């Protein structure tokens, strides 16, 4: 599966955006279907959510693992459900457009294992797109207010 890419410009300096994004508890609640966030460690979080794949919805818990990057303007993560039937990865990249503007880019992948993948694979692109757009749109609102 390929990653979904989405980007937008935020009217906020890069340092301000970086401070907010480096704290996943600030933006993980923006995932569609979000119900609850439980910090496990400084770089591991559990998200309880309603996962919607087309007309199929089910409650799931995804564990997000954030990995250190040599690039201070980048935040990478992997996530998976308890039984590993849902897995994925993502990356947020920041770049300064001007003193007061920052571009946020997101690369997001979502994979399903087993028979579900065969049935639901056609819907994954739209789910990834919705996740990417919702995350960044709500981040923009948070950062600009």
Image (cartoon, helix red, strand yellow):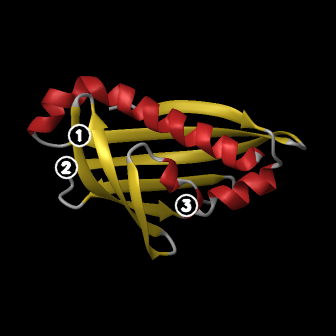
Q: Position of residue 81 (x, y in %)?
A: 26, 56
Residue 56 appears in view: yes
- SS of the residue under disc 1: strand
Pointer 3 local density, CA inside 10 Å: few below 14, some 14–19, many at least 20: some
In this view, the residue in front, 35 or 9, is 35
In the figure, residue 26 lies in which quadrant? bottom right
What residue sits 23% from the left and 29% below the top?
55
Mark 1 near mark 2, Cβ–Cβ under 8 Å? no
Q: Position of residue 4 (x, y in %)?
A: 45, 31
Residue 24 shows which numbered tag? 3
Closer to the eye: label 3 or 2: 3
Q: Position of residue 111 (x, y in %)?
A: 28, 40
- SS of the residue under disc 2: loop
Give the Cα separation between the discs numbered 1 and 2.
14 Å
In the figure, residue 24 lies in which quadrant? bottom right
Q: Which residue is mark 1?
A: 57
Mark 3 near mark 2, Cβ–Cβ under 8 Å? no
- SS of the residue under disc 3: helix
Give the Cα separation between the discs numbered 3 and 2.
23 Å
Closer to the eye: label 1 or 2: 1
């Amino acid at each position: 599966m390929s990653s979904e890419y989405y980007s937008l410009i935020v009217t906020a300096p890069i340092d301000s955006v970086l401070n907010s994004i480096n704290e996943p508890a600030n933006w993980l609640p923006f995932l569609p279907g979000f119900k609850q966030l439980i910090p496990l460690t400084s770089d591991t979080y559990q998200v309880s959510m309603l996962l919607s794949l087309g007309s199929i919805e089910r409650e799931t818990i995804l564990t997000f693992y954030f990995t250190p990057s040599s690039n201070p303007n980048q935040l990478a993560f992997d996530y998976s459900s308890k039984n590993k039937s849902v897995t994925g990865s993502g990356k947020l990249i920041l770049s300064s457009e001007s003193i007061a503007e920052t571009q946020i880019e997101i690369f997001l992948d979502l994979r399903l294992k087993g028979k579900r993948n065969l049935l639901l694979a056609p819907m994954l692109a739209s789910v990834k797109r919705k996740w990417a757009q919702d995350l960044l749109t709500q981040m923009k609102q948070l950062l600009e207010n």
